[in-house]
Image (cartoon, rainbow, N blue to C red):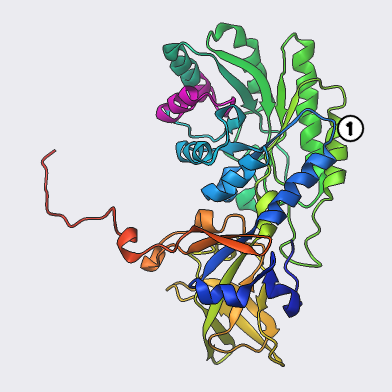
């Protein structure tokens, strides 16, 4: 769902009255629509109907175990980049056989744990990692299935910090290097290198980068098969953009993307893997916050709210736009810098934003906050992690309670026991 500026619509989300909900749960808090997530999954399956497709949700987008449980219930696997994400996914009921392990910095401990758990596939990103995977798999007497993550050197036309498919980025290896891996694959006794992987970035709003990247991947796939190598799977990553700003962001229709994939891989007989993250959860989530005060400065007015950059980092980190909807029907409009209480100038959600006139105590909704919100949160300024709530057909369930001060400092202790090295 995309948040609308219509107050009557915004007050109710997934059949739940947000004003009432905010009297039961302390603001700020996240709320997620279960049906919106199910709808996105269903839409993907419909668009790709008839293809041998695996959907592996990018856990980093929103790693709450209740969200992962919802994915498991819908038959969706997981794309992980850490041991912790694997443990979360398994705990939520996602089978290890439906997990792909990505990331440039897999440690020996993580690789060993993933092999022990039986993850389906490793997306390998360096020669060193490939050698480490061979050693650890050999020591355990198991065979690891692997795909090489190629860097197709394609500009995703997105924010520089979420572009991952250019030669200057840290991800993947060149096609020439990958070709050498396959040439030497027979010498690896405990790694079956039979897959390709490419992910060029996130929040992509044009088909052109996908078209170029997928063409390069498929050309390489054909070359490998002509050379006698078996390619069992092609992981085309994620990156599908969503509508953060109405009338400006124009996401790719999923049917158009699916048609491109069908056309590109028309003669491929293996499994296609899709790794959506933001696409499944961003527009399914909102952040509820309450106005603390309006501060009138010399040049502008500041609407100070109780949410902050430690709760939702995207505006500070990426200059990202999120819709902000006051949930009241007061007449009049004003322009505000919407800011949080953290001691940073960057703690700003919007600058010079035109909104209905606000007062202290007003409830506001920050839209499209379901991805890279709670999963990137911190306790900066000693602010406890906020609650998360799942909404489903008029019901709600708290899926993470607000952290207490004692829980926030539980791992800390006074320097009383000193040791010599």
**Can you tell which quarter of the image residue 164 is in?**
top right
Neighbourhood count class around disc 1 (C-alpha, 10 Å): few under 14, some 14–19, many 20 upward: few
**Can you tell which quarter of the image residue 231 is in?**
top right
Magenta: main secondary structure equals helix
Is residue 398 magenta-colored? no
Q: What's the residue at 33%, 59% (across, down)? A: 407
Image coords of residue 377 (percent x, y): 48, 58
Q: Nearer the viewer, residue 73 or 139?
A: 73
Image coords of residue 170 (percent x, y): 57, 38
Left or right of 101, for residue 163: right
Residue tagged 1: 263
- 119 to 338, vertically: above or below: above
In this picture, which residue range is highlighted in magenta?
Answer: 108-130
Left or right of 179, for residue 29: left
Q: What's the residue at 61%, 30% (across, down)? A: 98
Image coords of residue 72 (percent x, y): 62, 40
């Amino acid at each position: 769902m995309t948040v609308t500026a219509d107050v009557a619509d915004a007050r109710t989300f997934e059949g739940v009255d947000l004003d009432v909900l905010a009297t039961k749960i302390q603001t700020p808090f996240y709320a997620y629509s279960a049906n919106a997530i199910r709808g996105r999954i269903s839409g993907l399956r419909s668009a790709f109907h008839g293809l041998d497709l695996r959907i592996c949700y990018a856990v980093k987008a929103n790693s709450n175990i209740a969200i992962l449980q919802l994915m498991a219930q819908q038959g969706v696997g997981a794309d992980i980049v850490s041991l912790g994400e694997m443990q979360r996914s398994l705990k939520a009921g996602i089978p290890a056989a439906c997990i792909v392990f990505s990331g440039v910095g897999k440690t020996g401990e993580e690789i060993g744990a993933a092999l022990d758990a039986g993850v389906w596939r490793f997306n390998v990103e360096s020669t060193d990692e490939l050698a480490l995977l061979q050693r650890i798999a050999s020591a355990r007497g198991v065979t690891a299935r692997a795909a090489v993550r190629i860097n197709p050197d394609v500009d995703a036309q997105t924010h520089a910090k979420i572009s991952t498919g250019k030669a200057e980025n840290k991800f993947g290896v060149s096609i020439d290097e990958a070709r050498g891996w396959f040439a030497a694959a027979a010498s690896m006794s405990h790694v079956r290198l039979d897959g390709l992987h490419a992910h060029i970035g996130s929040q992509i709003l044009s088909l052109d980068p996908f078209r170029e990247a997928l063409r390069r991947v498929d050309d390489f796939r054909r070359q490998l098969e002509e050379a006698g190598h078996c390619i069992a799977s092609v992981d085309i990553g994620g990156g599908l953009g969503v509508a953060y700003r109405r009338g400006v962001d124009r996401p790719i229709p999923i049917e158009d993307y699916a048609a491109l994939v069908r056309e590109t891989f028309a003669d491929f007989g293996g499994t296609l893997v899709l790794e959506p993250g933001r696409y499944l959860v961003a527009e399914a989530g909102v952040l509820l916050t309450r106005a603390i005060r309006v501060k009138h400065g010399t040049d502008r007015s500041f609407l100070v709210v109780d949410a902050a950059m430690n709760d939702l980092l995207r505006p500070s980190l990426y200059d990202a736009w999120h819709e902000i909807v006051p949930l009241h029907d007061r007449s009049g409009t004003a322009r505000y810098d919407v800011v949080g209480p953290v001691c940073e100038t960057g703690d700003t959600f919007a600058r010079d934003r035109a909104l209905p006139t606000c007062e202290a105590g007003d409830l506001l909704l920050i839209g499209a906050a379901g991805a890279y919100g709670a999963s990137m949160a911190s306790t900066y300024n000693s602010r406890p992690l906020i609650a998360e709530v799942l909404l489903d057909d008029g019901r709600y369930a708290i899926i993470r309670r607000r952290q207490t001060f004692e829980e926030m400092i539980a791992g800390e202790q006074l320097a009383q026991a000193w040791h010599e090295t």
